[in-house]
Structures are given as C-alpha cells and as structure tokens.
Amino acid sequence: MVLQRINFIIDTERGDIMATTNFSVRLDSDLKKRSEAIYGELGINLTTAINVFLRKSLTVGGFPFDVRIDEPNRETTLALLEADTISKDPNVKGLDAEDALRELKK
C-alpha cells in the first residue's frame, strides 16, 4: 500500500482550494545550501522557488530558460582549429567573396 500525504491550501489570488502533495528530491547538499541562501535573500524558501519554476514551466511549455550546450562539439572544434591553421598558412591562397561564390557554384 502506498500512502501519500495530501494537504489543502487556499489560492489567495483565486480563492480556490487546491490539494498539495509532498515529493522528495535528491540533490547535492552544497547546491541545496547555496540555493536556500539565494532564495532566502529574495524572501522565499526553496519549496516556493521550485513551485515558481514548475508553474513557469507549465506556462511556457518547457524549461523557462534556454537549455543548451555552450561548448562546440568535437567536430566543430576540429573544424575551427583547421580553419585557424589554414588562415595562418602563407602558402594557402585566400579567396575573396566573388571567388568563393564561384567555387560554390562549381
């Protein structure tokens, strides 16, 4: 049997009675401590901060911020290194924009 504690709170903006539930999250203790400190400075606790995050996620239909890899992948990094090497090689003939367009049309 699974027991789940359900509380009821009143949404003061709408006057609705809403059921609430508890859930547990495992996280690094330092992350928790630092997060509690920053949200404490904003006048809210971590539970409220998580609720704000989840509500905003529902509003925007996903993460409420960009989630991306800021570093280029291996292939891009190698291409950038190759381009840098070529640009510094005095034996490589450079192309102006018109020459480059002609090369692309071939």
Image: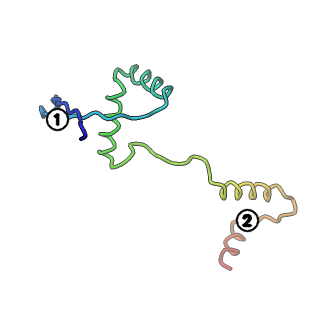
Task: Name the image quarter holding residue 2.
Answer: top left
Q: Is residue 69 above or below residue 55?
A: below
Kindly identify which numbered label has been placed on residue 96. 2
- Whether residue 9 sits left or right of residue 98 in the image: it is left
Q: Nearer the viewer, residue 6 or 37?
A: 6
Q: Earlier in the sequence, mark 2 or mark 1?
A: 1
* Crowd rating for badge 2 (residues with CA inside 10 Å; few <14, some 14–19, many 20+): few
Task: Looking at the picture, tell me which residue is in the foreground, 67 or 2.
Answer: 2
Q: Which label was assigned to residue 18?
A: 1
Instruction: Point out the image quarter for the N terminus.
Output: top left
Amino acid at pointer 2: Asp
Secondary element under disc 2, as helix, strand or loop, is: loop
Q: Residue at x 66, y 55 (%)?
A: 74
Q: Give the label, 2 or 1, closer to the camera.
A: 1
CA gap between label 2 and label 1 equals: 66 Å
Q: Quadrant of residue 106?
A: bottom right
Task: Name the residue nearer the viewer: 75 or 95.
Answer: 75
Residue type at the position of mark 1: Met
